[in-house]
């Protein structure tokens, strides 16, 4: 990373102290020590608990000041009434960053205690939280959370204002084979906020995209300015909760932030170049497509399918989203017609018919992927009785490899068990694949949105 910031200590610390470490399995202070120890973190790990000699075979210290080694990050997991003293100790020790796991601050109305803790920490100690489950960062193999011990490494930095949602997604991303470069539970955002993290991840070489679950902002201008700079390098996708009046009220009481009027957020996201997703499924679909594909060079899309119905659904979705299925040239139609059944269709969508096997898919995908007048491909497969979906999946993977991924390709596999197996194998190979045609089209929409954004930048435009 070319430039250090004052939040680097949260991601690549030399030493981590766990204030409130516990010998009791299941307690937060125990699980954090366990995760750090098992994650492969190579820095120093220092449990702090005046009533314990060791925690998980690690020497335990009565106070953070007793640690002789350098400690630049502290994870604080003590009751709310003890957090102030823990922060004072961290300041005396010269700790650079503190993750305050403890809840019981502004999210329950105690803004005074939260403000006092932050005031004590300034200017030398940065704080993530309070009311957080911690930080995972693949780059330093640091899992300073009380969430799952196993997290799949990938390209997306996920920032979440909801702790419970973030914990659930740690498990879900591994199960669905969505890797992450980082997960940050930002909690009440008393000090470090979304803007600080966007700045960091925009420079992080292990991060290709940024995904944020947001309920509200304390400093909207700071966030949008940071995002405006970051989107020139990496796409940012935001799930902004609190669209309805009741949802906004719930978000405010949940984290102690002000959710704000939704229309203002929508306009500001657009001006900053942020892609706003409707929900978790769409957000991860977009991120998967953006991570695993190059940006398109134009907007001409071709749909290849073995089922007319899937092709129609995809075409309808394209029109709804403003995408452009290409008018295929006569020479391309002739090339496709020469290798496909006479009762198929060489229009767009290209219908290979239900008898299309892996060999035919491979040949047709080669034809369209190599065309300079085609900018993106949506490959759809509907399971039939006589064709093995796993072989078709391999044909799609091989075509992508042969054509060096110079243009984006997304896929959908619709069917039963074998289609699910094919779907899983493609996910493992970092292919943007989905269980419905509509979701595959949505993924291509994200790629086209990124293309338009990059073209706007090339033309000298601002972020919007």
Image (spheres, rainbow, N blue to C red):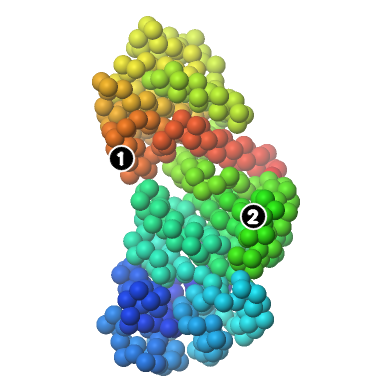
Depicted 212 relative to depicted 277: above or below? below
Q: State the residue at coordinates (26%, 27%).
A: 388
- The image position of residue 54, as x and y in percent, is 30, 87
What mark, if any, has residue 196 been given in the picture? none
Residue at 58 percent across and 59 percent down: it is: 198
Percent x, y for residue 133? 47, 69
Residue drawn at x 33%, y 80% as measured from the top left = 24
- From the viewer's perspective, is 333 left or right of 152? right
The percent coordinates of residue 74 (x first, y second) are 47, 80
Nearer mark to the viewer, of 2 and 1: 2
Q: Is residue 205 visible?
A: no
- In percent of width and height, residue 256 lies at 64, 68
C-alpha separation, residue under disc 2 versus residue under disc 1: 38 Å
Q: Quadrant of residue 392?
A: top left
Q: Quadrant of residue 448?
A: top right
Whether label 2 touches label 1, CB < 8 Å = no
Quarter residue 39 falls in: bottom left
Q: In terms of secondary structure, where does tag 2 sit?
A: helix
Considering depth in this image, is 315 or 227 the residue closer to the camera? 315
Q: Which residue is mark 1?
A: 425
284 versus 30 height, above or below: above
Mark 2 vs 1, N-terminal side: 2
The residue that disc 2 covers is 247
Quarter of the image that includes the C terminus: top right
SS at circle 1: helix
> In the image shown, does 36 or 113 lie closer to the viewer?
113
Query: Eyeballing the image, is 350 above or below 126?
Result: above
Residue at 51% of width from left, 90% of height from top?
A: 89
Quick check: can you spot residue 146? yes
Q: Nearer the viewer, residue 197 or 284?
A: 284
Q: Residues within 10 Å of mark 2 (few under 14, many from 20)?
A: few
Q: Total marks drawn? A: 2
């Amino acid at each position: 990373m070319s430039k250090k910031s004052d939040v680097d200590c949260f991601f690549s610390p030399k030493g981590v102290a766990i204030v409130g470490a516990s010998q009791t399995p299941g307690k937060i202070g125990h699980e954090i020590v366990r995760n750090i120890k098992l994650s492969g973190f190579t820095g120093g790990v220092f449990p702090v608990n005046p009533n314990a000699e060791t925690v998980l075979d690690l020497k335990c210290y009565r106070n953070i000041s007793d640690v002789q080694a350098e400690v630049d990050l502290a994870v604080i997991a003590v009751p709310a009434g003890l957090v102030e003293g823990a922060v004072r100790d961290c300041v005396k020790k010269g700790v650079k960053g503190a993750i305050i796991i403890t809840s019981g601050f502004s999210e329950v109305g105690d803004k005074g205690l939260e403000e006092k803790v932050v005031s004590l920490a300034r200017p030398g100690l940065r704080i993530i939280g309070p009311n957080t489950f911690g930080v995972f960062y693949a780059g330093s193999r640091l899992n300073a959370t009380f969430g799952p011990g196993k997290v799949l490494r990938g390209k997306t930095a996920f920032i979440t204002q909801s702790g419970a949602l973030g914990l659930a997604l740690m498990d879900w991303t591994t199960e669905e084979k969505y890797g992450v470069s980082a997960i940050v539970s930002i909690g009440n955002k008393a000090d470090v906020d979304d803007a600080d993290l966007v700045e960091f991840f925009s420079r992080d070489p292990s991060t290709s995209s940024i995904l944020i679950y947001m309920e509200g902002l304390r400093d909207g201008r700071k966030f949008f300015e940071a995002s405006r700079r970051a989107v020139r390098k990496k796409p940012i996708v935001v799930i902004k909760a609190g669209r309805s009046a009741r949802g906004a009220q719930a978000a405010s009481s949940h984290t102690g932030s002000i959710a704000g009027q939704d229309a203002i957020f929508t306009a500001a996201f657009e001006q900053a170049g942020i892609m706003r997703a409707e929900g978790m499924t769409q957000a991860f679909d977009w991120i998967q497509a953006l991570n695993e594909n190059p940006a398109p060079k134009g907007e001409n899309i071709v749909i290849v399918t073995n089922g007319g119905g899937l092709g129609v659904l995809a075409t309808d979705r394209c029109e709804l989203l403003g995408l452009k299925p290409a008018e295929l040239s006569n020479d391309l139609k002739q090339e496709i017609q020469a290798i496909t059944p006479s009762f198929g269709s060489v229009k767009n969508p290209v219908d290979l018919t239900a008898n299309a096997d892996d060999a035919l898919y491979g040949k047709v995908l080669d034809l369209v992927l190599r065309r300079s007048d085609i900018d993106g491909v949506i490959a759809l497969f509907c399971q039939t009785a006589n064709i093995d979906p796993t072989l078709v999946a391999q044909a799609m993977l091989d075509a992508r490899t042969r054509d060096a991924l110079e243009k984006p390709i997304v896929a959908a596999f619709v069917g039963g068990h074998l289609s699910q197996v094919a779907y899983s194998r493609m996910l493992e190979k970092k292919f943007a694949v989905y269980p419905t045609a509509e979701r595959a089209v949505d993924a291509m929409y994200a790629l086209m949105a990124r293309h338009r954004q990059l073209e706007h930048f090339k033309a000298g435009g601002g972020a919007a």
